[in-house]
Amino acid sequence: MTQFNAKSTTDDVLAGVDLSGKRFLVTGVSAGLGVETARALVAHGADVVGAARDLAKAEAATAEVREAAKAGGGSFEIVALDLASLASVRAAADKLIADGRGFDVVITNAGVMAAPFGKTADGFETQFGTNHLGHFAFVNRIASLIEDGGRLVSLASAGHHFADVDLGDPGFDRSDYDPWVAYGRSKTANILFAVEFDRRHRGRGVRAAAVHPGGIQTELSRHLDDGAIEALIEQINAAARAAGDEAFEFKSIPQGAATSVWAAAVADPAEIGGRYLEDCQVAGLANEGSGNRGVRAYALDPQNAKALWAKSEEMVGERF
């Protein structure tokens, strides 16, 4: 199999791949990685359902996706989904269940990063509620639509290095809010969700993996001023120097979406199931000196994953 890397793009990864007859669901198609992920898939013949909070914004942002679908023989449609509202999550899931068509792959791409303290419509801390709980409820509600042998690709981040989940205080009720700690918790949750979803569904051939797309300049950083981004990069580079790694480089959006597309359509499901992926490869375990590369052991811990699942069910008020 071709060995892809940090520089590989979506077009590199999908070269020669025909996705005709395959159906994908991608959340967060109003900007950045979500748009590029959808574009690459429809360009190779796939049928893609995109989900977005702001339908007008998504329609404008995905004009190129519709053009690629026409040229590539795929199709594209959008459904409304606000991950910060369980009512919206349930309405979107109900609509897809009523439609009844299955999906070969679900890619949970949407998210927020380093947001100031706030709460979702249901009273959850914004980042944990949007990045994790919204997707947790949505994916579990449509799990029956994922075809046997299908896949779930959960977008996480090297940001999971900032913090493990805190199941005793998920809403920062007893601790001071830190936007990066909150982001880290939510991204660790995205990985743990993939681990437990994979365990629960692998019996029917459905495999789940978590993906770190890399550092990309997208709308995700809208809550940060320039100084905050520069300070973060310097912190990452200091860790990289200590670990003997190369300095941080931003990826282009096609490079950033490549690992999602690789996991969704190219990688061996048996190799990626229950794992964390970066640069179109399965990542190794991180140690204290490994900078921001690799995956922290707590994010792959099966007991941690089960505990998060139980807490998440309690928080959203549903058992799956």
Image (cartoon, rainbow, N blue to C red):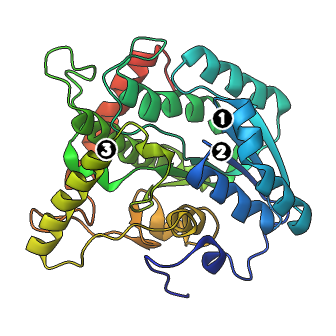
- Residues packed near mark 1 inside 10 Å, few (<14), some (14 to 19) or many (20 plus): many
Image position of 173 with respect to 151: above or below? above
Residue at 62% across, 80% down: 12
Secondary structure beneath dot 1 equals strand
Amino acid identity at mark 1: Ala
Residue at 20% across, 77% down: 245
Q: Decide which of 26, 31 is in the foreground and name it.
A: 31
- Residue under label 2, please give it: 29
Q: Decide which of 40, 210 is in the foreground and name it.
A: 40
Q: Is residue 110 left or right of residue 24?
A: left
Contact between marks 2 and 3 (CB within 8 A): the answer is no
Residue 288 position within the rendered picture, expressed as x and y whole percent measured from the top left? 9, 62
Image position of 210 with respect to 258: above or below? above
Amino acid identity at mark 2: Val
Task: Return the disc, 2 or 3, that comes first in the chain's sequence.
Answer: 2
Amino acid identity at mark 3: Thr
Q: Which dot, 2 or 3, sits closer to the camera?
A: 2
Residue at 42% across, 56% down: 274
Task: Return the disc, 3 or 1, that comes first in the chain's sequence.
Answer: 1
Q: Decide which of 261, 243 is in the foreground and name it.
A: 243
- Residue under label 1, please give it: 52
- Residue under label 3, please give it: 188
- Residues packed near mark 3 inside 10 Å, few (<14), some (14 to 19) or many (20 plus): many
Secondary structure beneath dot 3 equals helix
Q: Alpha-carbon distance for marks 2 and 1? A: 6 Å
Q: Is residue 196 left or right of residue 30?
A: left
